[in-house]
């Protein structure tokens, strides 16, 4: 039966046929729960409930990366510079940090040094750290790994590759 007809027959109160089962799809606004339902139908979210600190100074890149990671179920804290990134990472102890290396004022190397120092001093499990950069030369890749990033990706990073890398690395971290 059409839910509007059912609502009219119930004195204006809309009933959710699935409410006994905890289904969140049918809400008065018709949209609440749609994304969750669609994700259930499409399978498990690859970054479900992972906390990720994203450090990217370019607003468009920051927004698109945030949308990508959130669409996969991650809780994303997106910031524009290394100092904010350090503050967020130290406060949250995230599952992962995705950081542009070329940032204004202090670069991504500053962030990873501060984060790793905090993790060591506090005996915290190290966050997965992914360096993002436009630099393609080996010297940059080797420096990023030497400074404390476990992974290195050149921009523009392919969305599928980034999500798969984060999923696998966060899963390996959790298995330890």
Image (tube, helix red, strand yellow):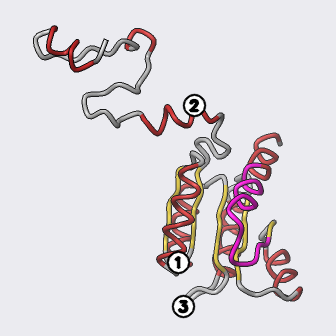
Q: Earlier in the sequence, mark 1 or mark 2?
A: 2
Circle 2: element type: helix
Residue 83's disc is 1
Residue 40 vertical placement versus 165 (above, below): above
In screen coordinates, is 101 left or right of 67?
right
Pinpoint residue 39: horizontal percent, then vertical percent.
56, 37
Q: CA distance from mark 1 to mark 2?
A: 37 Å
Residues shaded magenta? 152-167
Q: CA distance from mark 1 to mark 3?
A: 9 Å
Circle 3: element type: loop
Q: Earlier in the sequence, mark 1 or mark 3?
A: 1
Q: Are marks 1 and 3 in contact (CB under 8 Å)?
A: yes
* Corner quadrant of residue 102: bottom right
Residue 139 vertical placement versus 79 (above, below): below
Residue under the image location 58 percent in, 42 percent down:
49
Label 2: how many residues lie within 10 Å, few (<14), some (14-19) or many (20+)? few
Residue 42 vertical placement versus 112 (above, below): above
Pinpoint residue 32: horizontal percent, then vertical percent.
35, 35
* Front residue (pair 84, 42): 42
Pinpoint residue 94: horizontal percent, then vertical percent.
61, 54
Can you tell which of label 1 and label 2 is closer to the viewer? 2
The residue that mark 3 highlights is 105
Q: Are marks 2 and 3 in contact (CB under 8 Å)?
A: no
Pinpoint residue 59: horizontal percent, then vertical percent.
47, 77
In screen coordinates, is 24 left or right of 150?
left
Circle 1: element type: helix
The residue that mark 2 highlights is 40
Residue under the image location 77 percent in, 73 percent down:
153
């Amino acid at each position: 039966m059409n839910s509007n007809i059912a609502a009219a027959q119930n004195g204006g109160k809309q009933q959710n046929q699935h409410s006994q089962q905890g289904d969140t799809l049918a809400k008065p606004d018709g949209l609440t729960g749609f994304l969750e339902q669609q994700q259930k139908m499409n399978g498990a979210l690859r970054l479900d409930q992972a906390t990720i600190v994203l450090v990217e100074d370019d607003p468009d890149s920051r927004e698109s990366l945030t949308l990508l990671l959130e669409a996969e179920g991650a809780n994303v804290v997106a910031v524009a510079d290394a100092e904010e990134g350090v503050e967020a990472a130290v406060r949250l102890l995230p599952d992962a940090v995705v950081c542009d290396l070329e940032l204004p004022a202090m670069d991504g190397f500053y962030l990873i040094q501060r984060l790793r120092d905090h993790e060591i001093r506090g005996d915290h499990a190290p966050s997965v750290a992914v360096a993002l950069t436009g630099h393609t030369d080996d010297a940059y890749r080797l420096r990023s790994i030497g400074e404390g990033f476990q992974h290195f990706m050149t921009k523009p990073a392919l969305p599928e590759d980034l999500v798969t890398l984060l999923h696998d690395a966060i899963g390996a971290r959790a298995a330890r």
